[in-house]
Image (cartoon, rainbow, N blue to C red):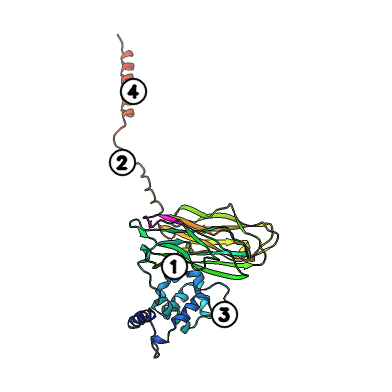
Amino acid sequence: MAQSVGRSVGRRASAACMAGLLVCSAAGVAAQDAARGAQLYRTLPGTPGVGSCLSCHGEPLNNRNSVLRGAAGGPLISRTIAAVSTMGYLRQYLSDADLADIAAYLATVVPTAAPETLPEPWPTFDDFGVQAVGTQAAERTVWLRNLQPRGEIALGGVVSSDPAVFPVQHECPLSLPPLGSCRVRTWFRPAAVGPAEARFDVLAPGGQLLRSGRLLGTGAALQPPTLAWAPATGLVDFGRVEVGRSAEMRLQLHNPGGAAVTLTRLRSSGPQALRFAVAADCLTAGRIEAGTRCEVTITHTPRSAERAESWVELASDAANAPLLRLQAIGVAAPAPEPAASAPAQDTTGGGALSPWSVLGLALATLVLRRGRGLGEPG
């Protein structure tokens, strides 16, 4: 298996070299280390403080934000980093050799089918926050959808890579119908103090890996405050929004506990994250004081007439509020109505008379004639 994967990577990289997508050194493709690239993808060198490739793109198998295009080589990844302002910070942590290794790792990730024919987890990432060891966090939900208007998707199950700490149960049928969805329930039961992580894998009936997602949490000796949304919700639906306009939704993030909470991340995530903006004073301050509420404004600006989906990632030193899913439908602005034309005006002084004018003229003539008759001598 390892040899076949290696040959596959070599063929892809060689083809990319011939296409001019890779800058091939004298050392050749073998100089690229896919195993090291996998580690870099998950943990950036240094301390950037804003996550990693994994935190933005998730498991590469899901091809979130078309991350698998990076398999074309380090130069393409470098150009993408330069073109996307939110990724610019990466260049101070990743060298050309690092990017080449990440590209080699991405080349080993081969989806079992075209992405549009695979089940779609929503979200692909969830952080439970901090939970006391020996207790269980409240249930979270991941929706597994078939986004195809036609064609069913056969499912073999959804499993956790660490079922003792992150149990997973699913309510999915053997075959997910077109535009159908099913619920995957997840929990966090920390067994030790410190960070914990697991994958949830969506499998085909034959056991092949179709999709994957990440579950995070941190075990603590004592139970910290628990953040909550007000109003309590798991879905923010903007409905239909005209292209060229923006719509806003406001919620409150509540800290009902007796200690302040440090807030390290509150942002829109997912393939269409840039269509949703998240702003909050507590995010700027980096904390939510005990017993207070922070107003969070979520703005959706459609770029085209189509559906957009995302979710809100929350990271703190408390038990996090349930993850928010975002959705909206962009619609084309209505065409402007044609201006009403003014009635034509007669500029020659002539023209036809209206019926009322003709009747008035006839009556006036009759009266004039009768007046003349009365005035004649007998």
Disc with the residue nearer the chain's start (2 vs 3):
3
Circle nearer the viewer, 1 or 2: 1
Q: SS of the residue at dot 4?
A: helix
Q: Check residue 364 in the rendering and tell me which mark sits there, or answer none.
A: 4
Disc with the residue nearer the chain's start (3 vs 4):
3
The one nearer the camera, 337 or 76, is: 76
Disc with the residue nearer the chain's start (1 vs 4):
1
Q: SS of the residue at dot 1?
A: helix
Q: Check residue 46 in the rendering and tell me which mark sits there, or answer none.
A: 3
Circle 3: residue type: Gly
Circle 4: residue type: Ala
**Residue at the image position 33 percent from the left and 28 percent from the top:** 356
Residue that mark 1 sits on: 64
Residue that mark 2 sits on: 348
Identity of the residue furthest to the bottom in this view: 26
Q: Which residues are magenta?
A: 173-183
Determine whether 55 is above or below 250 in the image: below
Is residue 5 shown in magenta?
no
Q: Residues within 10 Å of mark 1 (few under 14, many from 20)?
A: some
Q: Residues within 10 Å of mark 3 (few under 14, many from 20)?
A: few
Determine whether 264 is above or below 331 in the image: below
